[in-house]
């Protein structure tokens, strides 16, 4: 089936859902309390309106040779209300714009702290990518809506196990969008779904000893809906990820990563359920996400394992996800864990305990800024007002905390 026919079929299948869901469960405007973070010296959002691309740029970051993990200080950036995000790609470059190896990225997360996840009360994850994540795009009839006063908390980690150092690296995250004022297309509003086998809180990586390792997590969605597509993030020696309806016993989705003969994962497939109208999910059912590893070595893997599943869903007719509850202890702890991760990683490197968890979120965590992690770690920041490494053109939305 051609792309045009697939889009037409999808539009027919989801027309009723689009009409019934209306705004797709968009939340009313909310006040934005300050998010404790490490500043905004290493992040910018640029609206390239001529190409319908919103570009988030992180850097410069200094990546010495042989550095396995480095978390960039957590950043907050304002996001212009451009319309509907329908695709993404990413690239690492030097200050001249030349491409650098993809392997330098470990992962990056774009998080909306003012809206909640489907399965848990934590901040909504908008996009996540690892070195094995390829560019992805949706038909222009589907998109993640942006909102007035939207902002992203950006959490990123780099890794450079090579013998070559990179003094000024930049991560470019390019989000394709359908403009809000497009005269022809008004996309169906879809929303991210995210589940981690380690649950919503705590350390996300785990030991992978020799042999078989399996981790699972179970939960229920806040509202009924349909999942339109899924992907996953896994490390080397991962063999399978799956999603099951525990209530009915049905296997809803299963995938295997693309890996070399040595078990090194270089890519993961994505699954699209658009043409079948999506995978139905119900708030009164329990769902389980599982990841499996097979380690052939005689010792634990150097970088451990991870297992998360992410995708898009459409709320059922008339359904809206509940608003974020900033007093929910899980929400607060998750955000605090994200904010303090760079400091804990640095402390762990010094004490050889890199998996040390954050302490409890303070009662006044929304009162202002906390320890400036921007002063730690191998980051070389630009001078105030500098735009080194930034491509020319576009409107710059520098990160800030109101």
Image (cartoon, rainbow, N blue to C red):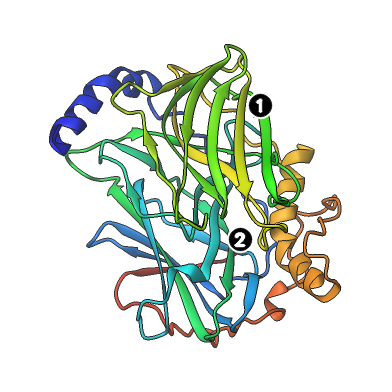
Question: Image quarter for residue 357?
Answer: bottom right
Question: Image quarter for residue 84?
Answer: top left
Depicted 375 relative to depicted 356: above or below: below
Depicted 70 relative to depicted 268: above or below: below
On the image, the x and y values in percent for residue 290 come to: 61, 34
Nearer to us: label 1 or label 2: 1
On the image, the x and y values in percent for residue 118 come to: 57, 31
The answer to which of 87 and 112 lies nearer the viewer is 87
Residue at position x 25%, y 41% from top?
140
* Left or right of 325 in this view: 382: left
Residue sticking out furthest to the top? 248
| Secondary structure under the numbered disc 1 in the rendered image | strand
The residue that disc 1 covers is: 219
The answer to which of 295 and 285 lies nearer the viewer is 295
| Secondary structure under the numbered disc 2 in the rendered image | loop
Depicted 284 relative to depicted 5: above or below: above
Residue at position x 65%, y 82% from top?
378
Sequence-earlier tag: 1 or 2: 1
Question: Image quarter for residue 388?
Answer: bottom left
On the image, the x and y values in percent for residue 47 come to: 35, 63
- Note whether residue 327 is visible: no
On the image, the x and y values in percent for residue 181 come to: 25, 45
């Amino acid at each position: 089936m051609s792309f045009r026919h697939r889009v037409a079929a999808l539009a027919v299948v989801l027309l009723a859902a689009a009409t019934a869901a209306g705004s797709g469960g968009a939340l009313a405007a909310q006040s934005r309390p300050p998010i404790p973070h490490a500043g905004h010296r290493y992040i910018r959002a640029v609206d390239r309106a001529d190409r319908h691309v919103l570009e988030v740029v992180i850097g410069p970051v200094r990546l010495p040779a042989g550095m396995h993990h480095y978390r960039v200080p957590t950043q907050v950036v304002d996001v212009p209300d451009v319309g509907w995000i329908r695709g993404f790609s990413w690239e690492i470059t030097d200050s001249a714009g030349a491409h650098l190896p993809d392997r330098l990225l470990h992962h990056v997360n774009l998080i909306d702290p003012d809206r909640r996840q489907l399965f848990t009360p934590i901040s909504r994850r908008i996009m996540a990518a690892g070195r094995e994540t390829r560019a992805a795009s949706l038909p222009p009839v589907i998109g993640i809506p942006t909102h007035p006063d939207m902002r992203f908390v950006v959490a990123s980690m780099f890794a450079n196990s090579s013998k070559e150092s990179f003094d000024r690296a930049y991560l470019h995250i390019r989000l394709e969008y359908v403009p809000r004022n497009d005269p022809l297309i008004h996309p169906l509003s879809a929303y991210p779904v995210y589940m981690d086998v380690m649950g919503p809180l705590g350390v996300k990586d785990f030991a992978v000893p020799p042999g078989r390792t399996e981790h699972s997590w179970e939960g229920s969605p806040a509202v009924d809906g349909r999942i339109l597509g899924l992907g996953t993030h896994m490390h080397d020696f991962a063999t399978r990820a799956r999603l099951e309806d525990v209530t009915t016993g049905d296997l809803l989705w299963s995938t295997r990563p693309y890996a070399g003969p040595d078990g090194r994962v270089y890519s993961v497939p994505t699954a699209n359920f658009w043409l079948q109208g999506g995978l139905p999910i119900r708030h009164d059912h329990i769902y389980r996400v599982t990841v499996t590893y097979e380690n052939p070595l005689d010792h634990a893997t150097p970088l451990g394992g991870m297992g998360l599943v992410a995708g898009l869903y459409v709320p059922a007719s008339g359904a809206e996800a509940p608003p974020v509850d900033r007093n929910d202890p899980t929400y607060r702890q998750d955000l605090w864990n994200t904010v303090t991760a760079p400091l804990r990683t640095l402390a762990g490197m010094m004490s050889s305990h890199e998996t040390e968890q954050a302490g409890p979120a303070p009662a006044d965590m929304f009162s202002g800024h906390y320890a400036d992690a921007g002063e730690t770690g191998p980051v070389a920041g630009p001078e105030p007002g500098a735009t080194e490494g930034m491509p020319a053109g576009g409107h710059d939305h520098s990160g800030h905390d109101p």
